[in-house]
Structure formats: C-alpha cells, structure tokens
C-alpha cells in the first residue's frame, strides 16, 4: 500500500481553493441535490466523525495510489470545483483524481454530466441505480460508496441503496426497473452474450430504443469508471458513508 | 435480428454530407494515419467487394440495432465527420452511432481523442494493443474489427493484430508490453482483484505512474465501448476487415 | 415475490412476547454489546424512520419467503429471545426464521454462539470480519446487513464494515488479517483448491492450527447461513442498516 | 503435505476407547442403518483390505492436516462414539475431527442429526442425495466418499451413488428429485441468484414450504461441512469406499 | 430422457456376435489387463447384481441417447470386439457407440490405442490418471466410471481412483505426477492460459518434451471423448462400477 | 519463450521434400479446395509478404515449442504431404507438428479427414464453422487462424470468418446454424450441462440424430486439437492470415 502523499490531491486542492474567488453559475455539479441542503456539511459535523474513529488513516488520503504531477485547473474546472464545494460541501474525489490533467478532467466531467444529469427517459435515480448495480458486479469500492449514497438520497430509501450495493436481486423493484438492472448487470458480466432478445425484454416492459441506449451508456460508463477506480485504488470521500442513512 | 432501417445512420449520413461544404482543419480524426494514404479508398475499391459477396445484408447496415431519431450535427462534429471522410475514406460507424445526439457524440469523441491520440508515454500502437486485448476478453466484434485493423496498420505487422484478437498470450511481446496487456486484461476480467502488487509489476518493467493511469484509462474506456457496442449490436465498417492484411 | 403474510414471523413474535414473563440470565445473545447500550432502541427512535420512508413495504416483513407453521418456543429459547430484546432492542430475524422449529433454532443458536462468541484465538471482531468477507463473496443480503453492522460496532470503524461488504481487498488490514480473509474467501469461492500451501500461509503469519480450525469453521458456517438466507429470501432487521455509521 | 501425527485423532480414539465402558442407548448415530447389519464390519473384513493395498499410507491417517490438542469427550459424546462403533463398526472421521473440543462436537452432531435423521418431508435418502450433489459441486473428497456410500446403502442402487458423485444430471431421477437437486446445486454454485422463481419451481413439483426449508438447510449444511473438510484436508474412513458397491 | 431403444447398440451387438466366428490375434484391446483375469466376468457374477437392484432401468441401455443406424463391422473391428469380449468379458460401450460407422470406430480405436497403450515415457497408469483428472474437471460420467476403474486396476489402489474422480488434489502424489495432473487440468479448464512457464514446470520435474507431448495429447483426447460422451449421454458398462474396489 | 530451433519442423520438412519424388493420388488433403486454385501460392507471392513485415521472427518458426526427434514419414504420409504441397502450396503446420511420429500423424489425419471431409449431413462449411466457434471459445490461435481461413474460403464471405473468430453470436445465421453453434459452444464451455433438452433443440431445427453425432464429434475433435495446439504453442502457417480476405 502506498504511503506517500498524493500530489494531484494537493495541487487540485490548491487549485480549487484559488478558484473560489471566481464563481461560476452555469456549471452542473456531479450530483444535483434536491432542496439544495448541504448534505456534506451535515455529515462532517454530524454523528459520524471520521477524524475521531480513525485519525491515523483517513480512508481517502491519498485519493489514489498513483503519484501524478498536478496541472493547473482551467477556469471552467476551477468554477466547477467551487460549485461542488458550495453545493455538496466537498469536491468528489474522482474529480480530484482526474485533476492532474485538466483535459482529462473536462472530458470525464462532460461525459458524466451528460449521462447522469442530462435529458433522458431514465430518471436520475434510475441512472444511479444502474451505477450501483454495475459497481456491485465489479465490486468497486469507490463507486459503491459514492453512488450508493446517491441512491439513498434520490430515493429517500436507505434500504434501496443497501440492496443494490449488496445484491440488486433482493430489492423490491417493479418490472421495469428489474429488467433495466438485469440488462445492465448482464452487460457488465458477459457483454458478449447480450443479443436482440435482451433488447426485446427491455422493450416489452416499456423502454424505448433511446432509453435502451441510455441504459447501455450508463452501464458502459460505470464499467469504465469502476476499472479506473480499481486500477488506481481510488478512495471515496469519507463523507459519503454516513449520507442519507 | 432487427430488419428495419436505422434512422441515425441515415440522418447522420445526411448531416455528414451537408457538412462537407464547411471544412474544418484543426479537428483530430479517430485514428491518425501515417503518410496520409487513403486506406479506406484502397480497401473499398480493392480485392474485397462486400456488395458482391453478400449484397443483401451488408454487415454494417444498420449500424446499430436501435432506432434512434437523429439530430443535426454541430458544426464541429460535421467538420469532424468531413475530416474522417477525407483522411480515412469513411466515417467510422461508432461515430454514426453516437450522431443521434450531438452532445453525446462530442463527449465521446473528445474522450476518445484525448485517450488514444493525446500525449502519453504509451505509443499509439500500445494504446491500440490495449484496445484489442480488452475487446478480445469481452469478445466485442465492433472493437476487434476496427482496432484490430489499427494494430495491423500501426505495427506494420498483420500477425500482431491477429494475435491480439485471438489470444494476446501468443503474441511475441517484450516484457513491458506483456505486463501492460496482462494488467489491462486482468482489470477487464476481474477489476476487484487489481491491487498494489499489480501496479508494482508495471513499475518494475519501467512504467511511470502516469503511464499506469493511461493504461488504466484506455482499458477502462474500451470496457465502456465494448459494452455500448454489444448492447446495441454495433457493426464495424466492412472496410476494416481487409485493411493492412 | 411473495405477498402473503409470514406465519412463523407472527407465531415467533407471539411466542417471544409470551416468553417475556419468564426471564433467563445465563443465555448468551447473538452478539455481545460493548457497554450494553440499547443500540436498537436508539436506531428505531433516531434519525432513520423506516415507517416514514417506505411504510407499505418494510423490508423485513415477512422475515422469509416461506410460510412455515410456527411451534412454541422452548423455555430456553424464549429466555434467549427475551435477552435479545433486552440487550439489542430486537430479536434478530434469523432467530425468528428458525423459530418455527425449536430444535432447529437450538442447534443453530448453539453452533452460532460457540463459533462467534466462544473461546478462540480469533477476536470477536475477526470472526465478524470473516462473516462479512464470506457473505460478500456470496452476495448474501441478510448477513451483509447484520454482520456488517457488527463489524462497524466492534471495530468502531464504520469504514471497515463498508470495505468488507464491498470488497475486502480495499480494507487496510495487517498481514495477519489479510491472510485470514484471503483464506476464508478462497475457501468460499473454490474450496476444492484449498491445500496445505494455504494452511502454511496462515501459519506463516502466526496463526496456530487451532486458529486455522476456527477460521475454517466460521467461514464454513457463513457459507451455510448465506445459503439458508438466500434460499428463503431472509430479510435483516431494518435497524441494522443505521447502526454504528 | 503434513507428515506429523495428528493429536486429536489419537486423543479422540483414546477417549472413545475409554467411553466404551459406559454405554448409552438413546443417542442417534450418524447414519441409521436399515436392518442393523454391521456394514462396517463386513467391509473391513471383506474383499477390500486397505492394509494390503497401501500399507504405508493409509488414506485416513491423520484424519485432518491440523494438529489440535484433544479434550476429553463428554459422557454423551463418549456414548455416541460407542454407539457408532457398535452400529457402523467405526467412528466416522468427521466426529474424530471435531472431538478435540466437545462443545463443537456436540453442536455439530446435534445439527447433523436433526437435519439428516430428524423428521422431514424429505426421505433420508433424499437428504443424502442433496449431500452428495452439493459435495460434488464443491468437489469435497470427505463428503463424497462418506455420503456417496450412504446413497448407495439407502437406495440399494450403487449406480445412483456414482451418478451423484460424478454428475447428478446423468442420474435418472423423477421430476421431484431432479428439481430438488437443481435447487441445491444452484444454491451451492451461485446462492445470490436464487429467487422466488426457484422456490416456485420446487412448489410446482409438490414440495411444501417446510420441505423447501429442509432442502435449503441440508444444502447449506454441506456447504459448511465441505469447507471445513477441504480447509483441514479431512480424510474419510477408508471403509466407506467399498461399502454397498 | 430418451425412452426409445437404441439401434446402434443392437446392431453393434449383432455384428459383434457375428464376428465371434472369425477370431483375430494381433489386435490390442482397449485396456490391457495384468494377468489376464476376466474382471468383467467376476464383476457380473459377483456381489453386485445390477439386474436385481434396478431391473427396469439398467444404466447402460441404451448406450447413447441418439438413434443411429448401424453398419456392419469391418473384419478388423469384429475381431477387435471379439478380443474385448474374451479379455474383458464385455465390449466397452464407447466402442458400441462408435460402431454405427466402421470408419469412425477404426479412427477412434486407432487413436485411442496409440495414445493409451502405445510407447510412451508415461506409464499406462499415468495416462489413465490423466484421463480421470480431465474427466473429473469435465464431470464426464462415462469416462469417470470406465477410466476410474482402470486407475483402480492398474494401481492396485482403489483409493487413488476415487481421489482422481472426486478431486485429484487430495491424492498423495509425487511431484512428477502432481505436476502432470496440474498441467492436464489447467489445459482442460483454460487452455488459452497455458504457456511456456507451464511447460517449464513439467521439464523441471523431469518430463522430456516428448512426454509433454504425450501428456498434452492424452489430455486433449479426453477433452474430445468427454464431449462426445456428454453430447450423446453415453452410458458406461455397469460392470465398471464394481471393478477393483 | 523458446528460442531454440525446432527439430521436427526440420526433419519433417526434409522428409516432405524427400517424399516429393514418390507421388500419390488417392490421399485426401486437409482441406479440399473449390476449383483447385493454389491459394497458398497466390498468398505467398501476393500482397502480403511476411518476410518483409517481420523478417526476424516469422510467426511459425518453430512450429511448436517442444523439441521432438523426428521420424521418417511413412510412404502414405509422404504422399499426403506432397499432395498438400501441390494443392495448398504448403503443408499445414499441424501435420508437421505430428510428423515426429508417423503413427500419431496417421491416426490424427485419418480422424481429421473422416470428420471434416467425409460423408455427413453437415456441409464442409458447417463443420468448419463449428471448428471456429469452438476454437474461439477456447481462444486457440492455431485453429482460429487456419479454420478461420477455411470458413472465409468455403463461404466466400470474409465477414463470416471474422464473426466466428470474434463472437459467433454476431453472425447472421439461420436458425439451424445458430442452434448448431450454440450446441457446440455449450458442449465446449460446460459439457456437463448438456442434456436431452439440448439434443431436442437440435432436432427441432431439423437435425437428424446422425447429424447430432457429427456436430458433437467435430466439436469434440476441436476441443482436442485446441488443447494440443495450446499445450505446444503450435503456430499456424503465416499464409493463412491473408487468405480469402
């Protein structure tokens, strides 16, 4: 296990701090928050105090197990980080991980925001449900912690988050959502076996072809993210764990 | 199997045709070509004539098995398609598949171009080798056909392309490249098992942490693309098959 | 999904209620609690109110998806349930599930208590860590929820519980504990491959042969429990989810 | 491979010998024998003589590959061993293995006897069939040898024992028994995939919910025993191999 | 399950009977027998009487689950069958299965006899050990029953046969034989992973390259036979089960 | 990776050269060629020049990674090699690999020729399709390269060869051929799961029991060949790669 400090983490944090002077309004944050409450603040000052329970090894330092030389954030990305800080109370570690290279951060954030927050026949909750079911199949710690929290928040149902983290088959889903997750998990586990019959099963429960694209694209995206996270030992912000329990 | 015509295909082709009037010079194409020869043209007018061998069902029509309503290409994307047409002799089908939604096309192309053509300690050939080894593990037809052709082209070694398509372990690689593909394939098959020891193995054969990121990001990207392609039954341009044999 | 009410649940609850009149002191409870605080009570009256977030389908009603005719609890078991109620604030659902047959409940409780609470060179936390790592391999909802909570409580480290639920390889363990979980998970995933070399690896990090027996027996036990729980769709008490976050 | 002698084996044998002086009548033996014939005696004095064919390395010495300090058997367990000796002609090695700790031996024997010999809608043969099918999936030598013999004895059909040891799918079973083993083997191989549909398949061939519990509990039990046996390299009594061929 | 009678079985038996008039001396039999005792006869008239224990469904009738029109045996094959009858007491069912086509029977028997009985640095027992270990990995009933008997006979060690049928890792083998079976089983389970390192491991324990060929060829052969047997539900002669116990 | 020269290769080539003086007419070649054109000659003098693209490491020298002392070819095999040379322009490397032992070469060639070129209700193309689908499941480089070329040649459809190499599920097959390949691939991946239902599925699309035998036998044969090839690192003749593209 790497014990050295993580440069991008530091440089990204410095860049994010510098960026606070220049606010930006039109940037979507990684996850939209209903009601705008600062969940992160609540969590960090609330019942669970990570500094107390394990002061020596906070789980998310360093963010990843690679030493990467950080670059300066572009103004757009600096504004984005500032918005995260304001709305969430923290910058998600995946963004800090990508921040060593502004171009990579931008392409990642653009794809993420389009897929997870853009227009779709799938609700934001449904997209997060796919994220968690896929990440459970791949046993990805980063994504299970962060998107498990998202499912708990969006659904207002803490149990649903746990079901999807542990075994999506135990969740009490309607037929549409069950078919959606069955497709996403099969696509994750054995993509070579996905065929017209699988698409037909989605159509039969009411999904349009455009929605099938979105299910596929979200499931595909997390198959990418899961692997970047596992390859780099990416650590979720500790704050996620206590959110919306 | 879907027998209906594929709208995005048509609309994207119309949009691409419309875009030909407004050229753009600074757009990278999906694959840079050494020497600028129009491989596609050679292939399409050469020995292999798909229209003759199977006129009724050209393999790549429709491009995908979903009917998606096409949108108009943005000027940037129209220019990009035009550049593909000029340099490659065709627009890669994956771009036509994404063209139903210009925003999605742009985020996909931006990430692709950064990863596969941007600065990296990995050569373009090495990145294509990862693409093929990952796609072989996932048995993804689209990516094996298109990136297998890229490996043959970049390497000038047709056998290397076949080795990676069929079983990368038979390729006669140096230690660095073998370690690179071992990591990428393990990350594909069981990402949950990737740990510090795996990163150490890469460092021991000379990879920097930044290069480990790039290996991970490229492997991750094709784990996404493979799944979008399999989920939608994406078909590669027929021209790829005969390239650089 | 079964929609009918679950008899053992009802009869067991009735039996448990009846048993409250006859207290018993010498019965070990399913999990010993440090300091004796009634965690269950706190959870049920605290921040998370399951009745509010999903009143129609409380997760743990019915306890299992089988309709079993309940029998009367033996005095020993009635006392045991009463003690659970006093110390934990609830009777763990796995006990309610077995309560349809007092003999089965007794053999289960006796084995459980011997393994998890009896004398051993493994700490109670270590035994719970094995329980969670095994249950994660088997994706058992009941055991992940209940024993994940136990790991959080015993360790005072909420993150450790999440690590073991999601992918034990991300937990920052010492060599001894890592070897212990590697053995337990291999024994779970492919018992036929466990050989002298595996036992030797445990001895090399300091485990005695007696401790190797205990690791094996605990891992074996949860391979049983996981399957009984999955076979019957056993539901954990909702209260576990918010414990010790 | 361990070459040292195995203490529990010795101490257990000493304890068992000591116990012979105090008989006990009400103790069930590990396997009830139709007609009360001493099969073991026949086998040990019959055609197959292990001492002759491989005198240097009798398969079952030591019983397990762990050196465990033996404890004195409780009177109940001593009586149990004596009864085994009288009825079977030998004490099953699994009991000798557990005998290092009387409490563990008692909980194991109690659960075993309740599950395999207690009241159930499943015949004893059916429970042994589950034991063998599960043990075949887990490739457990101890359980295949001992319970394979039990299937041969109970069924009077030596071939059935071999079918279940080798591949239960070749056995010519009625629909009820085939469904029972399909469930048990699926529960063994991928418990996370067992759902209401699987239980429904059992109900459709006539199993009651109580019998589904029993199938699950027996399958679960052997998933435990298989792992304890594999983890400790437990060796079956040589006598099993020639029984009821 | 097929209930119709099996033609090749009948026609082959008729052909074999017809062939008895014309003996042939120089034909090797499927398995050479030490000492020439007629094991089959002993088994069929001995302790185990299949006609008594399951008269309605003798396991090996029909030999396979396909109805194939039988052809006349060539004189060489008729002589071969006659020799089997004389030396073994029966014609192995695999030969009856292939007998519907004399050309196929001849190529099968020629390859079998060359591999299993021809010159090799591997003993006949070692080749049978490979056969059983491979067949266990593939869970092939026909080959486990017939070649398990062969291992028991050749080795004079009934336990060895059971070890290899159930899990070859429990057999107490020398390093050479263990390496041989490890190679054969890996080649069976994941041939794509076999590389120079695996061959080196065989050379290190003393195998010549020619012997590595033989290990590979025998393992390959049973990967073929296992599949023909499973595909056709081939049934071993009942007599095998009781041989050399 | 072995760097030593490969003896059988040399001796076999010498033997083949010597054999050219004594022609033989009635020997079938490994693959019959429609129209009798010498494809091999075209390939070796055509567009693809392996000596130019990778002069230092021609892929197929040595043919296998084992050093085997070559024997003299029998007159029949010498004639066979000569015929290959005349009709194909080369001797397939698999024959050179077996040539170290004429008896083994003869049994291999006899079985191959009976199965792949003999009478059958399956067309030669269909048998080659099975060969490729099986070899893809086993990721066998030798067989994918050589039989992939055969599918391209027989079908006149280069894409079909690529489909079967990469993932047979993307090929646009009729129901009969799809069922045939589904059976062959299941038989390859998990032979123990093949049962009467699988045979019934083949009968339902029109296969006779004799054709089911042939599908099984061809699939079985390539499960053997794939393993011999992988075990020995067998290399296909370079000429295959450019054939019939």
Image (spheres, coloured by chain):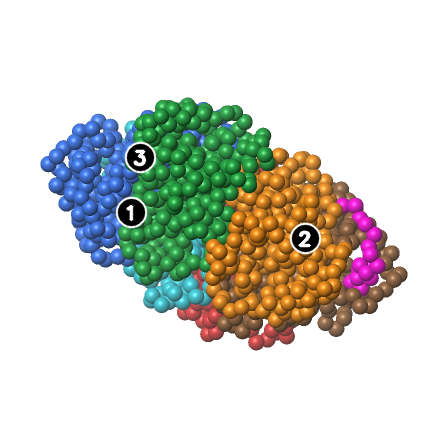
Chain colours: A red, B cyan, C brown, D orange, E green, F blue
Pointer 3: what residue?
A: E25
- Contact between marks 2 and 1 (CB within 8 A): the answer is no
- Contact between marks 3 and 2 (CB within 8 A): the answer is no
Q: Provide the secondary structure element on which disc 1 rests.
A: loop
Point out the stretch of residues depicted in magenta: C68-84
- Contact between marks 1 and 3 (CB within 8 A): the answer is no
Q: Chain of mark 1?
A: E
Where residue F178 appears, x then y in whole percent?
A: 43, 32
Q: Nearer the viewer, mark 1 or mark 3?
A: 3
Q: Chain of mark 2?
A: D
Looking at the picture, tell me which residue is in the foreground, F8 or B116: F8
What residue occupies the far left of the structure in this picture? Answer: F21
Pointer 1: what residue?
A: E119
| A18 sits left or right of B167 in the view | right
Q: Chain of mark 3?
A: E
Where residue F63 appears, x then y in whole percent?
A: 24, 48
Q: Provide the secondary structure element on which disc 3 rests.
A: loop
Disc number placed over residue D87 in the picture, else none: 2
Asked if labels 2 and 1 share a chain, the reply is: no
A181 within the magenta span:
no
């Amino acid at each position: 296990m790497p014990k050295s400090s993580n440069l991008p983490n530091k440089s990204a944090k410095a860049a994010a701090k510098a960026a606070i002077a220049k606010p930006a309004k039109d940037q979507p944050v990684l996850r939209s928050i209903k009601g705008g409450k600062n969940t992160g603040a609540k969590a960090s000052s609330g019942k669970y105090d990570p500094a107390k329970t394990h002061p020596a090894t906070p789980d998310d330092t360093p963010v990843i197990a690679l030493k990467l030389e950080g670059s300066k954030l572009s103004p757009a990305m600096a504004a984005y980080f500032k918005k995260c800080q304001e709305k969430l109370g923290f910058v998600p570690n995946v963004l800090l991980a990508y921040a060593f290279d502004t171009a990579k951060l931008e392409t990642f954030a653009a794809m993420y925001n389009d897929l997870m927050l853009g227009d779709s026949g799938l609700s934001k909750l449904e997209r997060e449900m796919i994220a968690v079911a896929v990440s459970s199949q791949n046993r990805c710690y980063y994504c299970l912690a962060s998107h498990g929290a998202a499912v708990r928040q969006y659904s207002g149902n803490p149990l649903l988050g746990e079901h999807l983290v542990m075994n999506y088959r135990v969740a009490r889903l309607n037929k549409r959502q069950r078919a959606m997750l069955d497709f996403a998990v099969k696509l994750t586990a054995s993509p070579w076996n996905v065929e017209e019959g699988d698409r037909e099963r989605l159509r039969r429960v009411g999904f349009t072809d455009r929605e099938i694209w979105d299910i596929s694209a979200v499931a595909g995206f997390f198959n990418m993210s899961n692997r970047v996270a596992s390859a780099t030992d990416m650590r979720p912000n500790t704050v996620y764990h206590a959110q919306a329990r």
